[in-house]
Image (cartoon, rainbow, N blue to C red):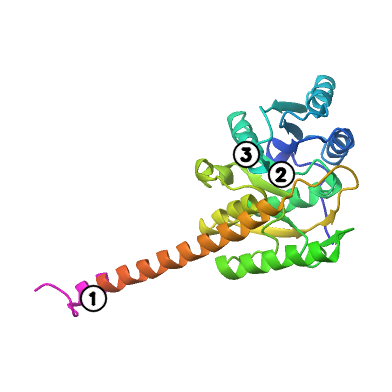
Amino acid sequence: EWVTSASFTDLGRILVIIPTYNERTTLIPIVERVRSSVPEAHILVADDNSPDGTGEIADSLAADDDHVHVMHRLGKEGLGAAYLAGFAWALQDGYDVVVEMDADGSHQPEQLPRLLDALRGADLVLGSRYVPGGSTENWPRSREWLSKGGNLYTRTVLGVPIHDATGGYRAFRADTLRRLDLDEVASQGYCFQVDLAWRAVQRGLRVREVPITFVERTSGASKMSQKIAVEALWRVTVWGVDDKVTRIRRRAHLRRANSRRTGGPGTTP
């Protein structure tokens, strides 16, 4: 059972980043639900020049609420690029906690307090569909198998103890983002989320998963494409191979160093 706090002022300033592209039907209720669930949180709508007028709706919300902000981007550049721009904006403006959240309602704002509570003892909190208590709603069986299979592959290849590395509902401490070398991140979609989680694990940061219920969007079209899924599979494979090669080279270097210290074979008299 999760006990949530009525206030998260102890965490500092909180920013929820909501990337949008053609989300005019869902943006207003999502913003309202976030403001109701965690009233002290600020919201940054990062709009990729939506042709359906989402950006104008966001401007209207910001004009009426000083907790809502809008970033107008030049065009559709992908989820990863939108989040990276939002992260930079958050860090420059001095926020202490940064949250990723979809605009389509699949990430329930009512579960945001659960992530923020867990962040009190972590550096990164992942909303997870695949830990006890987590679930998905209205997903076809084929998509669920693909998602679970992708996460199993990620755990196996990268050796990360994370059940849902591809999920996009997560809360970072600002200091965590500063340690992830965001300037080097170039991935998108599922792969973007895996990239950040793996970087956090590699740096020895405290990564915690909490259960969420992921609800399939009821309007609009999913932004996920076959190209993004293939990119994720390819990049995870490359990362895993590179990591194993690095580990092998490191062990070989240590063996040579130990051999020199003990006067073993191959040392120079």
Task: Judge depth for marks 1 and 3 and give the one in front.
Answer: 3
**Left or right, residue 131 beside residue 160:** right
Indicate the amino acid at tag 1. Answer: Ser
Disc 2 element: strand
**Left or right, residue 211 beside residue 259:** right
The earlier-in-sequence mark between 1 and 3 is 3
| Residue occupied by mark 2 | 100
Please state which of residues 203 and 191 is positioned toward the viewer in this rendering: 191
**As drawn, 29 above or below 253:** above
User: Label 2 neighbourhood size at 10 Å, few (<14), some (14-19), many (20+)?
Assistant: many
Residue 120, visible in the rendered structure: no
The earlier-in-sequence mark between 2 and 1 is 2
- Find residue 192 and report its horizontal and vertical position in percent: 62, 50
Please state which of residues 101 and 15 is positioned toward the viewer in this rendering: 101
Magenta stretch encompasses residue 21: no
- Find residue 116 and report its horizontal and vertical position in percent: 74, 48
Q: Do the residues labelled 3 and 2 touch (CB within 8 Å)?
A: no
Task: Judge depth for marks 3 and 2 and give the one in front.
Answer: 3
User: Label 3 neighbourhood size at 10 Å, few (<14), some (14-19), many (20+)?
Assistant: many
Q: What stretch is highlighted in magenta?
A: 257-269
Point 65% across, 39% down: residue? 83
| Residue occupied by mark 3 | 81
Quarter of the image where one finds residue 56:
top right
Indicate the amino acid at tag 3. Answer: Ala
Q: How far apart are marks 3 and 2 (CA)?
A: 13 Å
Locate the C terminus and report the quarter of the image it occupies. Answer: bottom left
